[in-house]
Amino acid sequence: MRNIRDVAFSADNTSVTTGMGNTWSQLYAIIEPQGYMVVGGRFATVGTGLALGAGFSYFINDKGLAVDNVVGHRVVLANGTVVETSKQSYADLFWALKGGSNNFGVVTHITLETIPTTGIYGGRVTYPESQLASLQKLTYQYQVNTQVHYTFTVYPSEAYLAYILAKFSKFCSSFAHIQGLAGLHTVMPIPPRAINKAGRTNPLGLDRAKPGKSLSGE
């Protein structure tokens, strides 16, 4: 499987098909220079097979799981037949594979929706205790602004915060001499995990079983 690494865009660039031998970093390295990204994993060495089970990205609030953004599979069935799944073709198998992992056949390729991207940036903002009201506003924005991903950390004292920042900065700076590697010692573009708005679901029961139906079938 590791040798199945071909990558191909659709004619209109609205989707991309990747062999399951690719890791997410290998896929990103091919499609990002062309101005596109997909919903995928957050760790470079994880394989694209992640999208058969779930798949958390930094944009999960807006776009759902990686599995939600899969629009097709190429599958080798138990009898050796190779089929292409989608909402229109082998639809039952298509939905079964959205969370079914490799239990219904050998998936050699998946097709993911693409999204145009110009780069995504990250950083760190530190607020004193006197600004808790501002943090409350940020917390609210985290719930309603799905284009922003926050991580909150509460420190017991300013002295402890200063100690942590100093240690962490020293740790990150120790890697600054390595070409192509950056950390929080500098402002840097984060490799985009941008994804199209899904609006779809998967059979894991995290949202709905199928479009237009709740888990209760209503």
Image: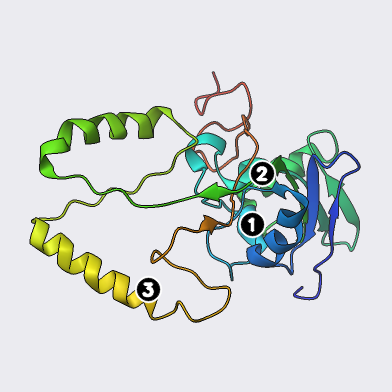
Q: How many marks?
A: 3
Mark 2 and mark 1: Cα distance apart in space: 29 Å
Report the front residue among 43 and 164. Answer: 164
Mark 3: secondary structure:
helix
Q: Earlier in the sequence, mark 3 or mark 1?
A: 1
Q: Residue furthest top?
A: 218
Determine which residue is flagged by label 3: 172
Quick check: 171 above or below 106? below
- The amino acid beneath tag 1 is Ser
Determine which residue is flagged by label 1: 101
Q: Which residue occupies 78% across, 52% down? A: 34
Q: Earlier in the sequence, mark 3 or mark 2?
A: 2
Report whether residue 103 is seen. yes
Mark 3 and mark 1: Cα distance apart in space: 37 Å
- The amino acid beneath tag 2 is Thr
Mark toward the viewer: 2 or 1:
2
Quarter of the figure with residue 32: bottom right
Q: Which residue occupies 75% across, 39% down? A: 92
Q: Which residue occupies 74% across, 56% down? A: 33
Report the front residue among 81 and 170. Answer: 170
- The amino acid beneath tag 3 is Cys
Quarter of the figure with residue 191: bottom right
Give the numbered dot on residue 117: 2
| Rendered location of residue 43, percent (x, y) | 53, 64
| Rendered location of residue 151, percent (x, y) | 34, 49
Mark 2: secondary structure:
loop
Mark toward the viewer: 3 or 1:
3
Mark 3 and mark 2: Cα distance apart in space: 27 Å
